[in-house]
Amino acid sequence: MSAPSRHVQSIPSTAAARPSLAPYSMVPGSYPISMGGSASSSSSHGVSSTTLYSAMSLASTQGMQISAALQQETERTALATMRAEAAENRLLRSMARFSSLTSLVNTVTAARHGNAIIAAVESRNELGELASWDDFVTTSPLQYLKAELKTPLAIAELKRNMSQYEIGVPLMEGGSLGLKLLPNLCISRVQRDDLDCQEGDKIVSVDGMSVKSIDELRVSLKGKQEVTMIIETGGTPLFTIHDALTPFWEVTSIPMTTTVRGGLKPGDLVLRVNDEPVAGLDTRKALDTAFATIGYLPGESKVAQRIRKEGLMSFATKVEVVVKEGSVSEPKYNIMLTKFEPEMFAGTYEASILLGSHQIGKSFQLEIAEGPADAQNTQVVLSGLWQTVAGEPLHFKIVGYDGANNLKLLGGCKIAVSEAKVTDLQNGTYSVEWTHTKVGKRKIMISVNGEIKQGVPECDVIAAEVDAKGSHVEMLSMNPSLSITSKAKGVEYSVVAGTRCAVSVKLFDTFGNARPRGKDKVTFIQLASCFESEPVGTEIPLLAVGLGAYEYQGLVVHACSKNGDNVIETSGFIVLVNGQKVREDPMIVDVLPSEVNLDKCIATVTPSGIHSRAGEKFELDVVVRDSWNNLRNRTHDVVELFEYNSVTKQQADRWGEYDVSSSGHGSYRITARHTLARQTYFTYVVNGVSSFTANQVHLLTITPHDVNVGQCVITGEVTSTVGQYISQLISLRDEFGNVLSPQQTAALEISVVNVKVLQADIDPADLKLSSRVSRVDHHPGLIYTHQLISTTEQAVHVALDLTIGSALLQRLNFTFEPDDVDERMCIIENLPRTIVAGEQFAMQIRVRDAFKNGLSGLEPTICLLPKDAAEATAIAKVSGTDLGKGNYVMSSKIYKSFHHFGISIHAGGKIIHSAVIEVLPAKAKAKNCDFECSSECRAHFPVMARILLRDEFGNIAFPDELYFSVEVEGCALQASDVCKFAESGGVFSVTFLPKTSGDVSIKVLVSGELLTVKHVTVRALATWSKEDARDWIVTLGYVEPRLSPVVATLADNFMRQGVTGAKVAGGLLDRGAFHFAFGIEDMQTAQFLANCLSDLSKGPAAPPMYLPWSWKTSGAPGQLVPLGPGDEGYAPVVERFKRTMPAAVVAAVERLESASLYQ
């Protein structure tokens, strides 16, 4: 419904427009609403609430900076404004109450930019009369007019049945429960294991007293050790939800403890709890309450489904108020929904018209029905990828949505799709079958009710299955400037080995579209070897290089060969696409050999080389190849042979005798002949090009021919020493002068025959000649094959013959001479071990070499020499005689005596014998002997004389008493009083003891010859001085052991008390004198000393018992007992002898036991 003329004013939907803050005045004597004036003039004086509120805010801000007077004025103005607002609100409530509302439509079609008038408001006063709002003093009431649409919600009442239980709780240390509580006494954590409670439960009372806060709980626990608590079960909410962060709560479950009055079930969307929107609510507080009124949308409703999908929750809308102009008596205002902003969900809503916050009339139901399909909201649905094969239909759906984005449930819309068949399913959905034959990205043009849809899908049309027969295959050179297309009949391509080529294949489907990259399997099969390292008869894959393009790149290396009929056997290949042949007949390719590559050429020579006999022909083949081992079977190449110098690594002289013939298949037969036996290297040159790798350098071994006696050579010495050998080197050669090889000489035997003695000192039958022929170890450059070794230990001159088989090789004469003197083989006979100085002695000497051959002519070199060169004059060679065959006799003399005399016998400059002999002195001769003796002595003191015996050569003679005699006269001495003692070094001691004074004559004879006559004067006892007496007593102490302890003291007393010979002779020294005067405590010792001194006065009658040389046994019974070095008395006797006779040698000491020494 609409008026003929109207004024349209937009009302904001976010909040009701606030009235002017300025006070207004009512028209006097009338109603609150004035009937005069027009709507347009009334609205022109209106001021928006936003403007007034901004002005007040600005004034409030500036009021902070003005004086107190202005601040008070502002406060009075604000108070007046508040009163005006309250009065205006009462006026709006009165207007809403008396005005009427008429619903104009029940259904509105949803549209993206549509509008619709849904209701009309008639303005009436409290008397029920029509009244215009245009003359409102301040802002027109039309500013407060608005429409509100609410989604009708289902209501459910929920109640949670909570049970209680009693529990005894022992308090922990410090009066703690061991529970973590929230301020409302709900348990958030149980910190002990002995309590049967859980999180979410709530403490209601303690020991029968109700508690509602933590402070009350602390008071009830104070001073207690155990309490009884009533706990209300918790932890189970009224219902559970899916997500608390969304502006709606989707119910997931309703616990058994919740009683539901209404149809709330899982899947429903809860929008309000206790008439409060769920957005921003505390979930725990809202769901843990005991009672709640729930506003919800059933989960299967369209609105709920759309909310769940899109999350839209705004239902407020802008409206336009259409004022009917003209008659004041009919003030009607039409309520128009404009532009449906925000877009409305299709469904039934509860519509209310409000004036400010006061509703006019009653709410009415308004259904927003789905509108026509909207091109931009309509959706294109495909379960899969926007991809199809060329020529095959693509099936998808178009799902209609209206301008408000409501799903279309009815058909009948005009849907057009280019190149497609569209079927209306009469449920808002349309089935489309789209077909295209050209590949690529294709946009599908769609129009909805004549409007072109923006953002249409783009379909990827891919090629259909490959058409193998329509594929394009060719072989190309990778060098763009090189064409390999052949002009020969039956051959498509002609390629030189070593050319890099490609097999290129392009694939298309039946519509001529290039096939997608890599979607097909493309291979080719070689019928014969062509490409490098690729097998024959096996599928070789091609790589995808683009749309429908496949390529294999490889190196063509295998050249075509010739068969036995000299016909080229070409190669070829077959291309397969997904296992299907592209063409039935293969592509024929003729591969030509490339240039000669000497590194690939080979000669038919074994690793050991070529072996041939001198003068005989030998053959070898040279196979000429290119760089890819292909035989050079299309051209004729020039092959030459040269010597190879292994030192300079270069080719040397060209071979002379050889022929070259071609086989036509790339090989060449070479026939050659050599007469010089040798081992050398050779190489071959092809087309003048040479290379010296291992394939081009080979070993050539030319072995000698059969032996030729006339060419053989024998050389060597013919004279040697016995025991050594005579060596003859034998060179067996062939007719060309080549030395035979060890293999050839192994079958030949050289013999030594007809050995004869030409000259020797032996019987020819006793000849012992050893001859041996042996092969010489082969070495490069060695020209001899055998060696003859002859040796003997006999000095001879012989002749012998060398034969090879039955043929005489050569006749030889050998001479073996004796060797040098060998001291081990020499023999010395009749060499005396002891000789006398000056006497001649002879010995037999046999001088021989190591092989016992006698050596003659060495007599001048044979001599006897001392080992000590200083004694060279002691030996003289008297004579020497050469008896022949190495036998000699030599006479010699030695003039110096030696106890051990080292001598050596020399012959031929060598010592052939060494020995140690004893050379005895000769008989003593008086003229060379020595005698010494003192010319004066004392009575009762021994007279000592020494004689040194020498032979005629000055050697000290043996100390033999038979060689000399001593005669003494005077002082009543007899011959028996003379004692002789042999000392070391050929010296004799002669002693006697004169007992009276006078002259003594000493006559010495040596070997019957007078040596000397010596006169000695003897002083009497009375002439002894005290020194003489001391010497005598000391001498006596040496002889008598009992005096040893006192002799030193006694000698000192003799000197101090002046004991002389006169006192001794006068008999003054008796036992008492020795005891008292000389301190001899032992009376027996004193008596012994007195007896000894008394005997001295007896003269010649004195007993000779005081000195060792005058001791004599009395003949009384006794036993001689030997004394050893460890026995008592042995050391003192030896010591006394050494003092008096330093040169004496003590042989033995014996003691006479149990016998009186003195008479």
Image (cartoon, rainbow, N blue to C red):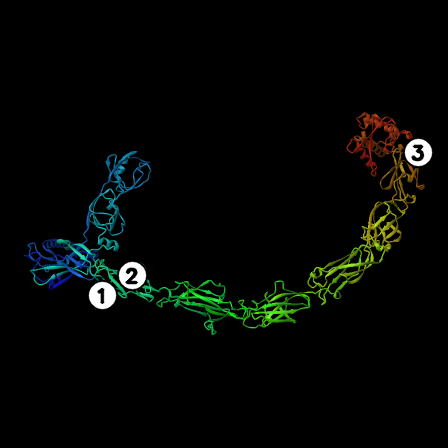
Q: Quadrant of the N terminus?
A: bottom left
Q: How packed is label 2: few (under 14 Cα within 10 Å), some, or many (20 or more)?
A: some
| Nearest to N terminus: mark 1 or mark 3 | 1
Q: What x and y, as percent, mark residue 460?
A: 33, 64
Is there CB contact under 8 Å for labels 1 and 3? no
* Circle number at residue 450: 1
Q: Quadrant of residue 288?
A: top left
Whichever of callouts 3 and 2 sits on the residue coming sooner in the sequence is 2
Q: Secondary structure at mark 3?
A: loop
Q: What amino acid is at disc 3?
A: Gln
Question: For the residue carrying disc 3, how many other residues have a C-alpha within 10 Å: few (<14), some (14-19), or many (20+)?
Answer: few
- Tell me the quarter of the picture where residue 505 sits: bottom left
Q: Earlier in the sequence, mark 1 or mark 2?
A: 2
Count numbered badges in the picture. 3
Q: Secondary structure at mark 1?
A: loop
Q: Which residue is mark 2?
A: 395
**Residue on which the image places disc 3:** 974
Q: Is residue 317 left or right of residue 868?
A: left
